[in-house]
Image (cartoon, grey):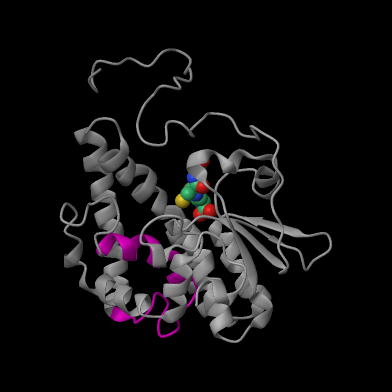
Amino acid sequence: MSESSWTPPKVWKWDSAGGGRFANINRPIAGATHEKELPVGEHPIQLYSLATPNGIKVTILLEELLALGKKEAEYDAWLINIGEGDQFGSGFVAANPNSKIPAMVDRSTSPPTRVFESGAILVYLAEKYGAFLPEEPSARAECMSWLFWQMASTPYLGGGFGHFYAYAPEKWKYPIDRYAMEVKRQLDVLDRNLAERRFLIGDEYTIADMATYPWYGGLVLGLLYDAGEFLDVTSYTNVVRWTHEIGERPAVQRGRRVNRAWGEEGERVPERHSAADLD
Ligand SMILES: N[C@@H](CCC(=O)N[C@@H](CS)C(=O)NCC(=O)O)C(=O)O
């Protein structure tokens, strides 16, 4: 059916054979599809995730905290295979009613504290361990502003541009044009900021960088949606420079491997229960 010939019905109905990648896990209802408890390891922090850009935001922060010497940030990272529907198990839904990775449970509190949404997890951990989120109010506001900017902007990159450019069953000009324009605008926002600053808020590396790097860093390296040439990503030279600096950090390299169940053998760390799993 062409874009212009379809008239929406009065009431939308779920066509589960709608097509496109992820058609098998997308559905219009929330809640669990099956009973399945989450595993629990020995550390206070239990992470249930996958090494997607949203997932590695959290493992990068946890590895950065450990690199700073915050031993209490030791964690168990369990694999949630979203392609297999693990996010719809009853235990996962109790940790995140939105059924998306990452989800975290802090068992050092009584009762345990669940946290979902990657941005909320970053703030929770940064506050708990006192690092990577400035305390001074102006710097803190700038950090929160960039963090919320990432959380609000990236759905246009992933769910908008990436979906229509790489995953939709056909290439449609209208949505690809619309989201390519928006993503290029977002890259320009970042590029102009990083022309003046080493990191997103200035000289200090914060959770705002950790949230933004996996998405926009991956994009300017040409690793997302095979869209490097199409979006002319190398023209955003300040974003490229920032990406390389962050990518050289050992904790970032460690965090990127956690909950990775694909790629080269040495890069795969499907579960992480101690530093030795990465060494
Ligand atoms: N805003 C959420 C987005 C999380 C998200 O979209 N996670 C994806 C993987 S990157 C997911 O779990 N998808 C599974 C699904 O949609 O069923 C966050 O930042 O935590």
Residue in the foreground of this view, choosing between 168 and 211: 168
Residue in the foreground of this view, choosing between 113 and 143: 113
Tell me if residue 202 is in the magenta stretch. yes
Is 69 displayed left or right of 4 in the figure?
right
Principal secondary structure, stretch drawn in magenta = helix
At which x and y percent is residue 211?
46, 65
Is 112 displayed left or right of 20 in the figure?
right
Residue at 48 percent across and 70 percent down: it is 255
Is 218 displayed left or right of 172 in the figure?
right
Q: Quadrant of residue 126?
A: bottom right
Residue 146 visible (yes or no): no
Residue 59 vs 176, above or below: the answer is below
Residue 202 visible (yes or no): yes
Q: In which quarter of the image is residue 31?
A: top right
Residue at 71 percent across and 63 percent down: it is 41
Is 278 displayed left or right of 125 in the figure?
left
Looking at the image, which residue sits at the far front? 265
At which x and y percent is residue 234?
18, 66
At which x and y percent is residue 46?
67, 62
At which x and y percent is residue 188?
26, 63
Tell me if residue 176 is in the magenta stretch. no
Image quarter hosting the N terminus: top left
Residue in the foreground of this view, choosing between 106 and 253: 253
Q: In which quarter of the image is residue 201?
A: bottom left
In the image, which residues are magenta? 196-220
Residue at 23 percent across and 20 percent down: it is 4
Residue at 28 percent across and 50 percent down: it is 225
Residue 120 vs 172, above or below: the answer is below
Looking at the image, which residue sits at the far right? 110
